[in-house]
Amino acid sequence: MIAEPPPLSGSVVHDEVVAARAPWIHPVRKGQTLRIVDLEGNQAVDFLLYNAHDDAERYSAQDTIAAQANIFLCEGSVLRSNEGAPMMTITSTAVAYHDTIGGACSCESNTLRYGHHTKSQHACVENFLVANATQGRGKRDMVSNINWFMNVPVEADGTLGIVDGISAPGLYVDLRAEMDVTVVVSNCPQINNPCNGFDPTPVRMIVAG
Ligand SMILES: [Zn+2]
């Protein structure tokens, strides 16, 4: 059974379905909430954040993990910048934990992991580059990302797994902006591992407040 998401406070200022495999870029102002809905379940949403007024300040997985002393992102987690400042807070989520250590898929990593025949398959790094290029950012602005709804357990020997998701149709995560941010998303096109159930699907983005 799917828990109903809590009502969003304020009015909805943006509501959009992002197609399977597509990039997305959008501003979220301080105090607004971004809700990401995993419409069909088991869809990894690769995610970067930049300070809307100075994009040299951006999401930092390292600062976030160090500050909360936990490698998983859960309800209450504060997403921190490379300057240690709170950028967004997970105010509510129907999924127990989300990943920020698995990274984004790329043509290069696909080739290494799954064989040369995957070289021309679309990947998250390309989506990030396409979306960021609209604001003048390039490869040097790519940093370690968040993977919403992606299940990356750490095994007893310290290795990472990419396994079947713990998300399901209609599950969501709510993120309250603690500063004006630019959100950059790749709705992950990966088809060579179970992160998208081998079938990339659309997600819904709602901004309210
Ligand atoms: Zn991906």
Image (spheres, rainbow, N blue to C red):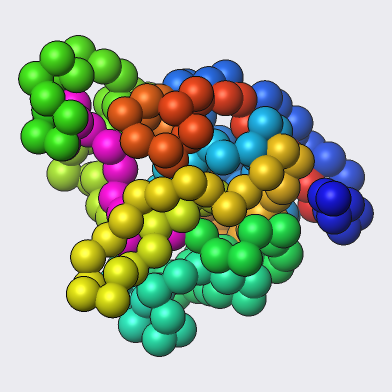
Residue at image point 62% right, 48% down: 167
Residue 103: give x, y in percent of width and height.
Answer: 29, 50
Residue 202: give x, y in percent of width and height.
Answer: 61, 25
Residue at image point 35% right, 50% down: 162
Residue 64 visible in the picture: yes
Relative to 53, is 171 on the left or the right? Answer: right
Q: Does residue 7 lie above or below 197 as drawn? A: below
Residue 42: give x, y in percent of width and height.
Answer: 56, 40
In this view of the protein, which residue sits in the foreground, 75 or 110?
110
The magenta stretch is: 99-110
Residue at image point 30% right, 69% down: 155
Q: Does residue 9 lie above or below 155 as drawn? A: above
Q: Does residue 195 lie above or below 82 as drawn? A: above
Residue 186 visible in the picture: no
Relative to 36, is 87 on the left or the right? Answer: left
Residue 122, quarter of the rendered image: top left
Q: How many marks?
A: 0
Assess whether residue 118 is covered by the magenta stretch: no
The residue positioned farthest toward the front in the image shown: 156
Residue at image point 54% right, 37% down: 43
Assess whether residue 104 is covered by the magenta stretch: yes
Residue 159, quarter of the rendered image: bottom left
In this view of the protein, which residue sits in the foreground, 17 or 197?
197
Residue 186: give x, y in percent of width and height.
Answer: 43, 33
Relative to 11, is 122 on the left or the right? Answer: left
